[in-house]
């Protein structure tokens, strides 16, 4: 299956994977080398009353949904937690794009119903299905710990899942499709062998 669209898409996804890898390295280097403030947001004070803090009219109430916290001269642990807020999703995105571009390259070279394509689809599915909660927990824990280190009054800073967990279903669907394609490929090979 050597269509122009598939070739272009394979090249485009590979370029995006490289770009995402450069963004990952750049973000890591910038955050490690930066000696400025680090900031995070928390919803701990969600819907808290802000009376007296804003110039509002009579009979008007104000509440906040998110509070932005910034730490000047952060510790090494706070810098590491700040890295954990950004890098996991960039890494998962970069790896998923790279695997998808390799899958499309195999489709162009060998056709869609081959052992290599089904294997790559299964690996991509497992990466997305397992990488999504791992990245979500890493980001959620990093943010919770960072908030707890900035505001010692907050004691309930347990790990949270951050990000779109619906991707787990998409990953599992890719795993299932990869297995179906693998069985279809084996059945086709058996049929060709008997004819």
Image: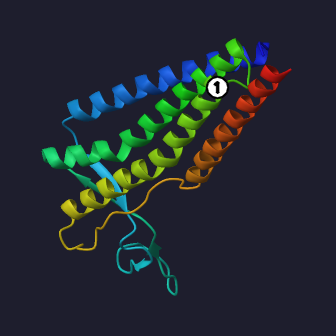
Q: Residues within 10 Å of mark 1 (few under 14, many from 20)?
A: many
Q: Is residue 73 left or right of residue 112?
A: left
Q: Is residue 125 left or right of residue 134?
A: right
Q: Which corner quadrant of the image does residue 181 belong to?
A: top right
Q: Position of residue 72 (x, y in %)?
A: 18, 48
The residue singled out by tag 1 in the image is 115
Q: Residue at x 35, y 31 (%)?
A: 27
Q: Position of residue 16 (x, y in %)?
A: 55, 23
Q: Is residue 6 left or right of residue 81?
A: right
Q: Residue at x 33, y 54 (%)?
A: 40
Say if 22 sits above or below 159 in the image: above
Which quarter shows the C terminus? top right
Residue 149 seen anywhere in this rendered image of the structure:
yes
Q: Residue at x 59, y 55 (%)?
A: 166
Say if 155 sits above or below 125 in the image: below
Which quarter shows the N terminus? top right
């Amino acid at each position: 299956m050597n269509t122009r669209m598939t070739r272009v898409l394979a090249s485009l996804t590979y370029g995006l994977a490289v770009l995402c890898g450069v963004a990952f390295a750049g973000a890591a280097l910038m955050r490690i080398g930066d000696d400025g403030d680090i900031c995070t947001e928390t919803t701990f004070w969600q819907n808290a009353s802000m009376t007296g803090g804003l110039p509002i009219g009579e009979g008007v109430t104000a509440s906040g949904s998110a509070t932005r916290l910034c730490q000047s001269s952060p510790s090494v642990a706070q810098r590491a937690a700040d890295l954990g807020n950004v890098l996991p999703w960039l890494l998962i995105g970069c790896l998923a794009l790279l695997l998808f571009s390799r899958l499309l390259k195999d489709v162009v070279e060998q056709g869609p119903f081959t052992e290599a394509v089904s294997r790559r689809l299964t690996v991509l599915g497992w990466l997305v299905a397992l990488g999504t909660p791992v990245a979500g927990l890493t980001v959620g824990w990093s943010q919770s710990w960072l908030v707890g280190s900035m505001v010692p009054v907050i004691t309930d800073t347990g790990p949270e899942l951050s990000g779109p967990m619906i991707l787990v279903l998409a990953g599992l669907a890719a795993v299932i499709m990869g297995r179906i394609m693998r069985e279809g490929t084996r059945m086709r090979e058996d049929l060709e062998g008997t004819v």
